[in-house]
Image (spheres, rainbow, N blue to C red):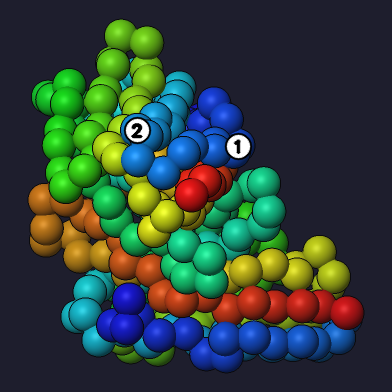
Amino acid sequence: GESVGLHLPTLSVQEGDNSIINCAYSNSASDYFIWYKQESGKGPQFIIDIRSNMDKRQGQRVTVLLNKTVKHLSLQIAATQPGDSAVYFCADASGNTPLVFGKGTRLSVIA
Amino acid sequence: DADVTQTPRNRITKTGKRIMLECSQTKGHDRMYWYRQDPGLGLRLIYYSFDVKDINKGEISDGYSVSRQAQAKFSLSLESAIPNQTALYFCATSDPRTAEETQYFGPGTRLLVL
């Protein structure tokens, strides 16, 4: 079956630095991924998505990179701010069945 | 997201009790989901419903049941609660008519089973 995982459970970065959160997937047929941000006490919120016809997609201060060859995607946050502190999930949204979520990476921003 | 609401937000119950968690949405979405979140395990799907007449088991449906009373309402029941069902429960919705079928999550229900 599908699995979506993250390389590191926790990540600490200095305020102002860039953050990179990684995610690996196992299904080579997967073609659509979503990144979610979950702040303490709240439900996950959509950040950015990417389809397999793209290698890179940019949003506001966030960039997602997709490497289909090694089945890996990453979320890059530029100029990380204290408000970016949260748990970040990648999700495989490829199939007709609901999302397959990774376990999450907790990002802590050091002021 | 205020468009997806869950009640109660917190619940303490005892082993063997039947409890119901409720989810309501004003987004007009056909699809609704129930997830469970445990520390270190991420979000795991319990049940999902693609419309009022449709109910599907997710990854961890044992010990749970659901009811889709209307497009806007999807409730989750624990028939006989046990301590390892202590977790954070999230309801979510999505609209299959959109190209990016993003799920919108409620604020969560924190459940403690003693």
Disc number at residue A18? 2
Q: How far across and down, in percent of the image, does residue A80 sit?
A: 35, 43
Chain name for mark 2:
A
Q: Total marks drawn?
A: 2
Point 30% across, 40% down: residue: A79
Disc number at residue A9? 1
Q: How far across and down, in percent of the image, does residue A32 sit?
A: 25, 36
Point 37% across, 20% down: residue: A72
Callout 2 environment at 10 Å: few (<14), some (14 to 19), or many (20+)? some
Q: Is residue B2 above or below residue A11?
A: below
Q: Secondary structure at mark 2?
A: loop
Please name the amino acid that badge 2 sits on: Asn
Q: Is residue A21 above or below residue A36?
A: above
Please name the amino acid that badge 1 sits on: Pro
Point 57% across, 86% down: residue: B9
Nearer to me, A21 or A71: A21
Residue A18 in sight in this render = yes
Q: How far across and down, in percent of the image, does residue B92 sit?
A: 39, 69
Q: Is residue B31 above or below residue A30?
A: below
Mark in front: 2 vs 1: 2
Residue A25: quarter of image: top left
Spatial CA span between label 2 and label 1: 17 Å
